Image (tube, helix red, strand yellow):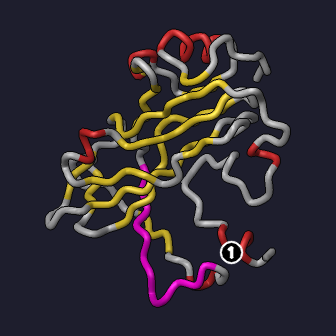
């Protein structure tokens, strides 16, 4: 991935997003130009999901107490069924990579929020995320309704806003216990951080 200073400051609009992709500042696989919005790139829901299941109190410093990632099979129609109150982790369909001169913010779409579905995890995507091989973004999906919600893998689920930066001295992928090379959903690495305190 080439490290070229973006020619725009602040948030990247559609033209700048296309240029960032064409110059290698932004890496997206698979790339679909139809997902470029006026000031963001939409990302789609991947085809696997995991329910967070606990068996007692969770001690963030003790990995053995962390929620289990239980695979969720799609239903007979290929839909992801999210039960009321359930917390599901699912990857984006796209793998992305950012140069050291780009940073991102991820947010769920208002379409899902209006249906009582929260799509969040960590909104920040640091400079250098996935810059070597690309990485999925793991999304936390929560159903706030009283009934199941049926979701469709491959459908647009969140937006990635991109910002030009002055470049990071230490890219995200060089930090310990990061998620910059994940090609699938992985469990929390928080215990590794807490133990170092």
Q: Which residue corresponds to the image point at 43% horizontal and 56% vertical from the top-left?
A: 140
* Image spot of residue 155 (x, y percent): 32, 36
Give the left or right position of residue 132, taking residue 103 as reference. right
Q: Which residue corresponds to the image point at 57% horizontal and 51% vertical from the top-left?
A: 184
Q: What is the count of numbered marks?
A: 1
Q: Which quarter of the rendering shows the C terminus?
A: bottom right
Q: Which residue corresponds to the image point at 66% horizontal and 52% vertical from the top-left?
A: 179
Give the camera-side residue of 112 and 67. 112
Q: Main secondary structure of the magenta part?
A: loop
Give the left or right position of residue 39, taking residue 122 as reference. left
Q: Which residue corresponds to the image point at 46% horizontal and 51% vertical from the top-left?
A: 139
Farthest front residue in view = 10
Question: Where 125 falls versus 69 (above or below)?
Answer: above
Question: Where 161 falls versus 2 (above or below)?
Answer: below
**Magenta residues (range):** 48-60
Farthest right residue in view = 169
Give the left or right position of residue 153, taking residue 83 as reference. right
Residue 7, quarter of the rendered image: top right
Question: Where 187 falls versus 62 (above or below)?
Answer: above
Please say whether residue 54 is one of the residues in the magenta stretch. yes
Give the left or right position of residue 109, taking residue 135 as reference. left
**Disc 1 target residue:** 191
């Amino acid at each position: 991935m080439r490290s070229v200073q973006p020619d725009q400051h602040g948030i990247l609009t559609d033209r700048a997003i296309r240029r960032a992709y064409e110059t290698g500042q932004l890496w997206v696989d698979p790339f679909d130009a139809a997902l470029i919005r006026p000031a963001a790139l939409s990302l789609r829901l991947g085809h696997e999901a995991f329910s967070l299941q606990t068996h007692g109190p969770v001690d963030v410093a003790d990995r053995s107490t962390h929620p289990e990632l239980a695979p969720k099979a799609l239903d007979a129609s290929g839909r992801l069924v999210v039960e009321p109150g359930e917390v599901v982790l699912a990857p984006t369909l796209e793998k992305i990579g950012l140069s050291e001169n780009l940073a991102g913010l991820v947010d769920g779409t208002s379409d899902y929020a209006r249906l009582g579905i929260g799509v969040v995890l960590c909104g920040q995507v640091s400079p250098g995320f996935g810059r070597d091989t690309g990485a999925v973004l793991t999304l936390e999906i929560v159903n706030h309704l009283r009934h199941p919600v049926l979701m469709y893998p491959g459908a647009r689920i969140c937006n990635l806003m991109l910002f030009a930066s002055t470049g990071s001295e230490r890219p995200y992928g060089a930090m310990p216990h990061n998620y910059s090379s994940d090609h699938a959903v992985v469990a929390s690495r928080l215990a590794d951080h807490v133990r170092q305190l």
